[in-house]
Image (spheres, rainbow, N blue to C red):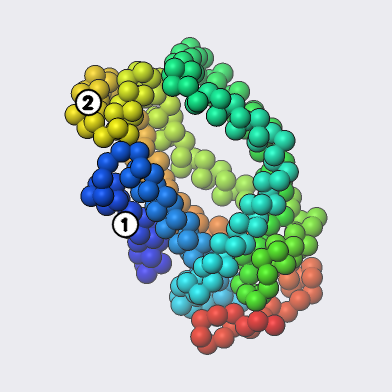
Amino acid sequence: MAWIAFEFCVNHLLGGLAAPLAVGGGSGLTMLALSAVATVAVFYYFTFVKVYGLSALAVSVMRGAPAFRYAFSGFGRGWHSVGVHLWIGWCLFVPALPWLLPLLGFCAWTCAVPERSAAAVRAAAAYLDAQPYMVCACAAVVVGVLLTPTIAAWYRYRLAYMVLIDHPDRACRAIVDESARLMEGRRSTMFRLDLWFIGVTALLYLPGCVSILRGIRGLDAVAMQNMANCMLKGNVEDAVQTLQSIDPGALGLVLGGAFMVSVAGFVLTLWLNPYWTAARAAFYETVLDLVEGQTPPPLREDGQLEVP
């Protein structure tokens, strides 16, 4: 229950500390951008504090000495965890440049002119309304083709945070390289381990996503864009008037779907993520004990793992 409370505070309370920037500090695009940057920064740091802490807790369970203090050990390694994540991101970003740059260029070209972006939104909404299943199938194929090489490369670094727990004094690059070494020839095994969790995650999010898609089909794209422009300019009254002209049924489907997605994320955080992390820790221990022949480092009394 203490871990659940910690997860709730990090996900829903700490990120909300940036909201007063947009409410009390002013209005318009500048304050909205400041609020977004502050919120993302808070989430980014504490997310990897959680990742390290939950990973350390899972490793301690696998080694027969569970102690809840390990869940909070990430506060001493937060920036190191962020550094490891950034290095992993860099290793994945460089191979993705051949298809990422054209995609970003197309998005920038579309959004550069408001009329062009509005036309693109209307065209997408019309095609989604006419052929919803075809759109979803094509999107799935495109995303799969583009992301499959990146996901395959990402699996090389699935044990990076476990390596960081055992070797906290190593540089970020050395930790990532060690994870790649341990995962050599074992990525398919890890993927098969993850398949069950991926399936449960998809089932959790499916009802909410279907509701949102059905609601989007009934929304007026032009009205939604006008409302967004009014909110960015601080014209609350115009935004409310525009909102009143939107189909309430479609808006209800979107909001209900968003609520279901939030509930799915809550279940994912409280139940599935710890289970998933424990499975990854068991995989890591198996690699160390049976394949690599290494002895896992012992545990210390101060809540950290002993550095070999």
Report if residue 107 is visible in the image: yes
Q: Residue at x 52, y 40 (%)?
A: 202
Instruction: Say what secondary structure mark 1 lies in.
Output: helix
| Residue 28 x/y as whole percent | 30, 38
Amino acid type of the residue tagged 1 in the rendering: Leu
Measured as percent of width and height from the top left, residue 114 is found at 44, 21
Question: Is the Cβ of the residue at disc 2 closer than 8 Å to that at disc 1?
Answer: no
Which quadrant of the view contains residue 184? bottom right
Q: 3 or 75, which is in the foreground?
A: 75
Circle number at residue 17: 1
Q: Which quadrant of the view contains residue 3? A: bottom left
Judging depth in this view, the residue of 80 and 55 nearest the camera is 80
CA distance for labels 2 and 1: 27 Å
**Above or below — where is 237 with respect to 170?**
above
The quadrant in which residue 41 appears is bottom left
Decide if residue 84 is on the left or right side of residue 9: right
Residue 25 spot, x, y in % from top left: 26, 50
Residue indicated by mark 2:
238
The reply to whether residue 54 is visible in this rendering is: no
Between tags 2 and 1, which lies in front?
Answer: 2
Crowd rating for badge 1 (residues with CA inside 10 Å; few <14, some 14–19, many 20+): few
Classify mark 2: residues with Cα within 10 Å, few (<14), some (14-19) or many (20+).
some
Question: Can you tell which mark lies on residue 83?
Answer: none
Q: Is residue 26 left or right of residue 270?
A: left
Q: In percent of the image, x 50 and y 25: which residue is there? A: 112
Q: Residue at x 46, y 15 (%)?
A: 119
Secondary element under disc 2, as helix, strand or loop, is helix
